[in-house]
Image (cartoon, rainbow, N blue to C red):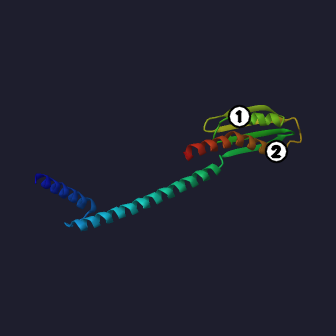
Amino acid sequence: MACRVQKRISLRRKLHILRVLTYSNSAKRTSLAKSTVLRLYKLKLALETVKRQYENLLATRRECVRLLNHVKENKDVKIEKVGAGTFMVRVTCEKGGDNLVAILKAFDEMCLNVQQARVSCENGFSLEAIAVAEDQTLDVRDITEVLLKAIGKQSGEKDSQMFDKCCDS
């Protein structure tokens, strides 16, 4: 008989816990069971809503990462023709990296001899140089294109690949 009383007390505790969890005031077991099932259904719907919102946030994040990968680094190349075959070259970038090496290689490929240069890596990268061309037919537009390609190869490709790796995981 004591065992029966303990089971009844245990059942009443469990029913009380169910009433509290389902916000039900009913004393009947069937009504309490219905309230419990209804509460579980509402929780399931809420969970599905949260999952949908999470998937939407992930899709938005992927879209933002994709757009950021297409945004180019702020690069500025200005070339002025000072005299016959002499050019004033100004290059500024947000990121330094190996830009100096790439620019010097580009100068070498175009047969430009640097007469004077000033380079700074503080708050980005900047270069001012006076260069003399061995080939007098070299144009400002040609030099600008080659330097932009050289800077782009050094910083743009590496940074976007690293950004992809860290954001896709």
Query: Could you tell me which residue is drawn at 78 percent across and 45 percent down?
Result: 145
In this view of the protein, can residue 127 be seen by the observer?
Answer: yes
Is residue 25 among what the camera can see? no
Seen at 71% across and 41% down, the residue is 153
Residue closer to the observer: 31 or 126:
31
Q: Which residue bears the numbered disc 1?
A: 100
What x and y, as percent, mark residue 162?
61, 41
Classify residue 38 as left or right of residue 104.
left
* Residue at 27% in and 59% down: 21
Residue 133 is labelled as none
Q: Is residue 124 left or right of residue 44?
A: right
Residue 57 rendering spot, x and y as whole percentages: 50, 56
Please name whichever residue, 103 or 23, is drawn nearer the observer in this view of the structure: 23
* Residue for badge 2: 142
- Separation of residues labelled 2 and 1 (CA atoms): 19 Å
Residue at the extreme front: 1
Q: Give residue 67's position: percent from left, percent from top.
A: 61, 53
Element type at mark 1: helix
Q: Say whether disc 2 or disc 1 marks the residue closer to the N-terminus.
A: 1
Amino acid type at circle 2 is Asp
Q: Amino acid at mark 1?
A: Leu
The answer to whether residue 145 is above or below residue 17 is above
Quadrant of the snapshot with the N terminus: bottom left
Percent position (x, y) of residue 90? 73, 40
